[in-house]
Image (cartoon, rainbow, N blue to C red):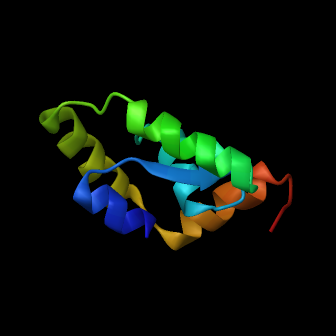
Amino acid sequence: VFIEAVRMGIPIIATRYSGLGYEFIKSGWPGVIVDPEVDSIARGIIQTRLQIIPNHDDLSKLQNEILNSFSWQKMARDILKEWNLSI
């Protein structure tokens, strides 16, 4: 879902436990990080609707950077690092 959102140029809502969505937002993609509970997700939806989306050129550049740098291995390493685990 997150890769599809990036390809479509729309902001995302993710928890810090979501892995891919969290990593995209940390990389600069528009969106919000919420707690995994109903009220926080609802607030995230409202925040995302009010968020200023970068212009088309900036968004396209960010899309290319994110999609070209994405790999499951890197994501796994980043998640383990975030959770203070080692491989």
Residue for point 64% across, 62% down: 18
75 displayed left or right of 51:
right
Q: Residue furthest left?
A: 57
10 displayed left or right of 50:
left
Where on the picture, by quarter, is residue 77?
bottom right
Residue for point 51% across, 46% down: 45
- List x then y, in percent, for residue 52: 33, 27
Residue for point 44% across, 37% down: 28
Residue for point 76% across, 60% down: 80
- List x then y, in percent, for residue 53: 30, 33
- List x then y, in percent, for residue 56: 14, 37
Q: Is residue 55 above or below residue 84?
A: above
Q: Is residue 67 above or below residue 56?
A: below
Where on the picture, by quarter, is residue 43?
top right
66 displayed left or right of 16:
left
The image quadrant where one finds the N terminus is: bottom left
The image quadrant where one finds the C terminus is: bottom right
Between 7 and 67, which is closer to the camera in this rendering? 7
Between 80 and 22, which is closer to the camera in this rendering? 22
Between 50 and 31, which is closer to the camera in this rendering? 50
